[in-house]
Amino acid sequence: MDAKTRAGKALAGLRKLYPEAAVELDYKTPLDLLVATILSAQCTDKRVNIVTKGLFGRFKTAREYAEADSALLEGLIHSTGFFRAKAASIQAAARTIEEEFGGKVPDTMEGLLRLKGVGRKTANVILGSVFGKAEGIVVDTHMKRVAYRLGLTDEKDPERIERDLMALVPRKAWVFFSHAMVWHGRRVCAAAAPACPSCALNGSCPKRGV
């Protein structure tokens, strides 16, 4: 079975397993999701959602983040880890949003990549979840692991993995595929102990590295 066929079978299986797959970060606005995604680096979505419950009550606009006391912001996000770097990224991104985008989170890949702390992964999350735009595929640690095990890529670099997956998965399915693969990595295809016997993708998965 070639990679294209495996990708098609994986996509079909994921649609049955997780028809409602979506980003698991809580947000109401594009700015909320931008901040939450920056905070999610090396941190669980559950922890981020606890932190942002209070954070989003204090800060509503990019200007408010940009002008916030750095020590206050660092304290509010401390439990997400790497809080100084994350606070600096949030405030720098907020300043760019104010200065270059009229206070609104940009809705293009080019615009998002101008923001500090935003790479293709974060940009793809925002574009797909908020703006409904399929510009690429989100490659996080779960996607890297599951895509390799399924035999969809041999690459290690996130951008190369993304290119491989974009060539195998129809563009109209990129947003769903991004979320569903992450869900599968969290719920079934865990790093240490994947539940292969009960996995609905078992029949077409070569189980590489397992």
Image (tube, rainbow, N blue to C red):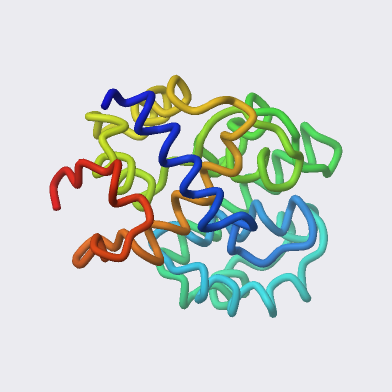
Q: Position of residue 114 (x, y in %)?
A: 61, 31
51 w.r.t. 155: above or below:
below
98 w.r.t. 89: above or below:
above
Residue at the farthest front position = 203
Q: Position of residue 94 (x, y in %)?
A: 70, 48
151 w.r.t. 72: above or below:
above
Residue at the image point whose x is 40% and y is 33% from the top? 7
Please state if 12 lies on the left or on the right of 27 as rendered. left
Q: Nearer the viewer, residue 86 or 154?
A: 154
Q: Position of residue 30 (x, y in %)?
A: 75, 50
Q: Nearer the viewer, residue 9 or 109?
A: 9
Residue at the farthest left position = 209
Residue at the image point whose x is 36% and y is 34% from the top? 158
Residue at the image point whose x is 33% and y is 59% from the top? 199
Residue at the farthest top position = 167
Please state if 176 lies on the left or on the right of 95 as rendered. left
Q: Nearer the viewer, residue 50 or 115?
A: 50
Residue at the image point whose x is 59% and y is 25% from the top? 171
76 w.r.t. 172: above or below:
below
Residue at the farthest right position = 102
